[in-house]
Image: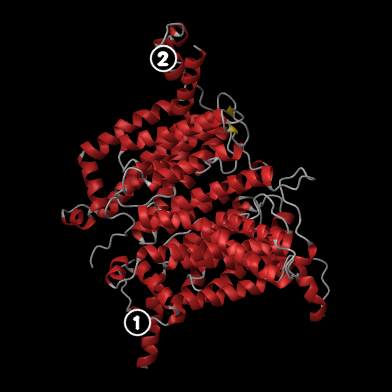
Amino acid sequence: MEFLSDIASLINSTLRISTPLVFAAMAGIFAERSGVIDFSLEGKMLMAAFVAAVGSYYLGNPWLGLLLAIIVCVCLSMLHGFASVTHKGDQVVSCVAINILIIGLTTALAAAWFGQAGLTPTLNEDQRFLEIHLPFADALRDIPVIGTLYSDILSGHYVFVYLAYLSVPLVFWIVFKTSFGLRLRAVGENPSAVDTAGINVFTMRYKALAINGVLIAFAGAHLSTAVNANFFREMSAGRGYLALAAMIFGKWHPKTALIACLLFGFTDALQIRLQGVELPAIGEIPVQLIQALPYILTVVLLAGFVGKAIAPNAIGQPYIKER
Amino acid sequence: MSNIVVDKSKVPWWVSNVIVPLVNLTLALLVSGLFVFIAGENPIEAVKLIIYGSFGYIQGFAYTLYYTTNFIFTGLAFAVAFHCRLFNIGGEGQAYIGGLGVFLVAINLSFLPVPIVWLLAIFGAFLFGAAWAYIPAYLQSKRGSHVVITTIMFNFIASSLMIFLLVDVIRDTNQMAPHTVKLPEEIWLPSFEAFSGILGIKIRYSPLNLTFLLAIASLFFVWFLVWKTKWGYEMRAVGHNTQAAIYAGISPHKNIIIAMCISGGLAGLLGVNEILGVSHKIQAGFPAGYGFTGIAVALMGRNHPIGILPAAFLFGILYQGGSEVTFEMPNITRYMFVAVQGLIILFSGALENLFRPQIESFFVRRLNREVNA
C-alpha cells in the first residue's frame, strides 16, 4: 500500500506541475497554427503571474486578479501582433524583446512597490485560489483502487488543474472541428490562399493571438495565486519554453502536446522525489544535475526520436498582401 | 501606414543606418522614462545620475569601458550567428562555460611564460564557448530543433552544471561560498591602474583591463571574417536564402555549425575579461545577464561591428550609470535596466519598421527637392 500511495502522490503532483505547461502549450498552438511564432509564452506567463498576484492583493479576489492578468496578457499578445503582423518585424526578435522586458519590468516594479527583494506580499486565503475537494472524497478514500484514484488523484486540486485538462478537448474542437479552426490552420499553412478566399489574414492572426493571451494568463495565475501565494522573481523558470518544446514535440496538436506536457510534469515530479535519494550502483545524484533533468529532456525531445517536426508552412513569415 | 513605398536605392545610407536607429532608440528611452516614473522616481534625475555615474569621474568611466568590453563580446556573438539567420540566445551559458575554459587552462598551465598562458587561456575560452554552442548548432542543422529553445535550455543546463562543479568539484575548500581558488597573481591580466601612471592619472581601482583591446581586436576579426572571407559570404548566403545557397553548392549544415561555434566562442571570451581580468576566480552566476544584453547590443548596432561598438558603449553607460541610479534611488533596482534592454530590442529590433517608411520618404522627398531646385 505504501508503494501505491507513492505512485498516487507522484501522479497527483504530475497533474499539478503539468498544468501551466498545458495552458501554455494550448496558447502556443493557437499562435503557431496561425503562422505566428510565440517564444514570448515565457514572458507572458511571468507577467500574468505578477499581475494576478498584485491584482488579487489589492482587489481581494483572485478571480479579479485573473481577469486583470488576462487583459494584460492579451495586450502583450497584441503588442507581439503589432510588431510582427502589422509591421512585419521579426517574430523571434519581438518575442525575445517581450521576454526580456517582462523579466526586468516585473521584478523592477515588485521591488519598487513592495521592497527590494522583488516579492509581492503573501496572499491570504480570500485572495488566492484554494484546493477543491470533490464531493465524497473523504468518504470514498478507504475503498481500494477507486478510493485512491478519486480521493488522492482526482480530488484536491486547484481550479486551474481541472480547467487545463478541460481546455485540451475544447482546443481540439475549436482547431479541428469548427470553421474558425479551419481558417486558423489555413492562415498558418497558406495565407495567400486564405486571402484569395476573402478572409483577412491579419484579423485571423490577431484573433489567434488574443486567444493565446487569454490561455497563457491562466498559466501565470496558477503559479502565483494557486500553487504559490505570491509572485517572485523569474518564477516562470523556463516553463514557457518547455511548453513550446512540448507543443513542437506534439506536432502542433493538442492531444499529443498534452502527452508531452504530462511527460515534462512527470519528470519534474520525479526530479523533486529523486533529490537526496541514494540510487543503487550510482549513489546519490547531485541535486543540481537532477534539477537540470527537465531542460535536458526538452533538448532530447526536440532532437526528436520520433522524426523531424513539421511546422505550419507559413510560420515566422510576415504576410505581405501584394507582392 | 505601410502603404508608403520608398525606392530603397534613393535612401542615403545615413538615413537608414543612423537616423532611423536613433529615432528608435529615443522611443525606447522615452518609454523607459515612463517606467521609471511608474516606479515612483523622477526620470530626468535618473538621466542626470546615469551621465554623472558613467562620465563624471575617472573611475566611473573605467567601469563604463569595462562593461563595454563584455557587451562587445556578447553583441558580436549574437551578430555573427544572426548573419546566418540563427538566433543564438545562449550567450549566457556559452560565456559561463567559456569562463570554465579560461580557468582550467590558466590554473593548470600557470607554469608557462605569462603571455603564452594568456594566449592559451583566450583559446580555452573560445574553445569551451564554441563547444557549448556546437550541440544546439548540430541539432538545428540535422534535426531542425529550433536553436532558440535549445540554446535557452543550454543556458539552464550550463547554470546547473557550473553550480554542481563549483559546489562539488572545483570549489575553494577553505571557503563556504561556491567559488574557486584565485589564480596566481602573476598571470592576472594587467588592469587599467597599471597603465594609469603612464597616462598621468591616478586611479585606485578599476575592473578595466587589457581584455578591452582583445574586444576591439574581435570587432576587426568579425568584420574581416563576415565581410571579407569566402566563408563569411557563404554564411550570409545561407542566412539570406538557404535554397539558393544549396543550389550554389554551399552547405547549410557546415555553415550553421561554424557560425554557431564562432558565436559561442566570442561569447566565451567574456570569461577572459571576468576571470583573467577582474575576479581571478569563477563565481556562481558571473555572466550576470551580459549574454542577454548582447542581443540588444547587436540589434541596436544593426549586427555590424561599426554599430556594435557604440551600442556596447551605450549599454556600458546604462550599466555603470544604472548602478549609480540604483544606489541613489531606492525604488530603482538593476532589473529596471533589464526592462530598458527589452524596450531597446523591441524598438530597434522588432519594431524597426515602425517609422522607417515615413522617415525615409521624408528624406528622399527633401533630397529630390534640392536636386530639382
The residue under label 2 is: A150
Q: Residue most toward the left?
A: A197
Query: For the point 16% across and 53% down, which residue is it?
Result: A197
Q: Which of pointers 2 and 1 indicates the residue nearer the eye?
A: 2
SS class of the residue under badge 2? Answer: helix
Name the one closer to the observer, A320 or B143. B143
Q: Chain of mark 2?
A: A
Name the one closer to the observer, B41 or B209. B209
- Number of labels in the image equals 2
Q: Coloured how?
A: secondary structure
How far from the left and from the top, in percent, is residue A78?
Answer: 39, 51
Query: For the point 52% across and 49% down, which residue is it?
Result: A102
Q: Amino acid at mark 1?
A: Ser
The residue under label 1 is: B9
Q: Are marks 2 and 1 on the same chain?
A: no
How far from the left and from the top, in percent, is residue A54?
Answer: 56, 37
SS class of the residue under badge 1? Answer: helix
Residue A148 vs B9, above or below: the answer is: above
